[in-house]
Amino acid sequence: MQTTLPCGGGNRGLRLLQAAPEREWPMRSASIKRKTKETDIAVTVALDGEGEAKIATGVGFFDHMLEQIARHSLIDVTIAATGDLHVDQHHTVEDVGIALGQALKQALGDMRGITRYADVNLPMDEAMTRVAIDISGRPYLVWKVAFTRPRIGEMDSELFREFFQALAQNAGITLHIENLYGRNNHHIAETCFKGLARALKAAIAIDPRQKTKVPSTKGSLSG
Ligand SMILES: [Mn+2]
């Protein structure tokens, strides 16, 4: 019996395929609006973005940190937040963590194809922070970070933990952040955010060897 190749023109069919590459994976994105008596927040994320950031929370140093998340995860992030900053920064920082976490969770959907686990050691001058992440559907934060100043810029240092707690809880991720050493409080804070960004970038990346599968022997990461 004679076999014939489906494409008679040599590798012309292959070249045509290469000339019109199609996106294999739909853009993973989400928008969240969250309004309470304390804060009014709008967040959008595009996981497969280029790290574009449009951030305005009314807390300058916090904006600087949130921009690091976008820039180093390559997630496009917009955050517009107005809050009761006349009380203090607590509600605004925590509620941005809640809304950003909800947006990440919604954008990840059923988590099909993701790498799931990632860890990074993130240096900045004299400071080093380790961040490990499991996009598990099970929220948990381990926070081993100490600051020696009550504020960085105008931001209250104790609120960093509140932000990461709200983010982990609402994104449904297990998140371990440990500052291994460091002296400058600005550097220590920045390594936490950049470390989260780089770990997130790796953990949400689609693994081409399992792109149709949820990375769990349970077959589900819904928590
Ligand atoms: Mn900085």
Image: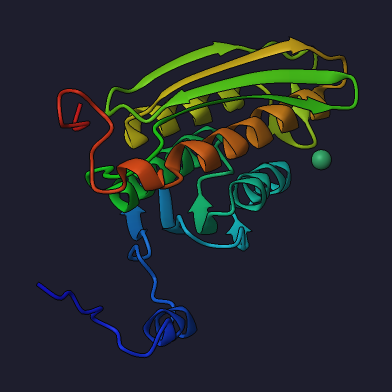
Task: Please identify the residue farthest to the bottom as the structure is shown.
Answer: 9
Say which quarter of the image contains residue 166. Answer: top left
What is the count of numbered marks? 0
Q: Position of residue 55 (x, y in %)?
A: 60, 58
Residue that appears at 32% across and 47% down: 108
Residue 117, can we see it? yes
What quarter of the picture does the C terminus occupy? top left
Residue at the farthest right position: 125
The residue closer to the viewer here, 171 or 99, is 171
- The residue at 64%/34% (across/down) is 193
Q: Between residues 102 and 25, which one lies in front from this camera angle?
A: 25
Q: Nearer the viewer, residue 81 or 52?
A: 52
Viewer-closest of 89 and 184:
184
Above/below status of 153 relative to 118:
below
Please, which residue is most extreme toward the left here? Answer: 1
Rendered position, 189 above or below 103: above
Query: Going 41% across and 43% down the picture, which residue do you hit?
Result: 207
Q: Position of residue 159 (x, y in %)?
A: 58, 26
Q: Position of residue 23 (x, y in %)?
A: 39, 71
Q: How is the image coloured?
A: rainbow
Horizontal side of 109 relative to 220 (left or right) equals right
Q: Is residue 127 left or right of residue 99?
A: right
Q: Quadrant of residue 195?
A: top right
Quadrant containing the N terminus is bottom left
Q: For ligand 1, which image quadrant applies?
A: top right
* Residue at x 51%, y 31% (from the top left corner): 163
Above or below 87: residue 173: above
Q: Give the quarter of the image for residue 138.
A: top left
In percent of width and height, residue 39 lies at: 43, 48
Of all residues, the one furthest to the front in this rendering is: 1
Residue 88 visible, this orientation = no
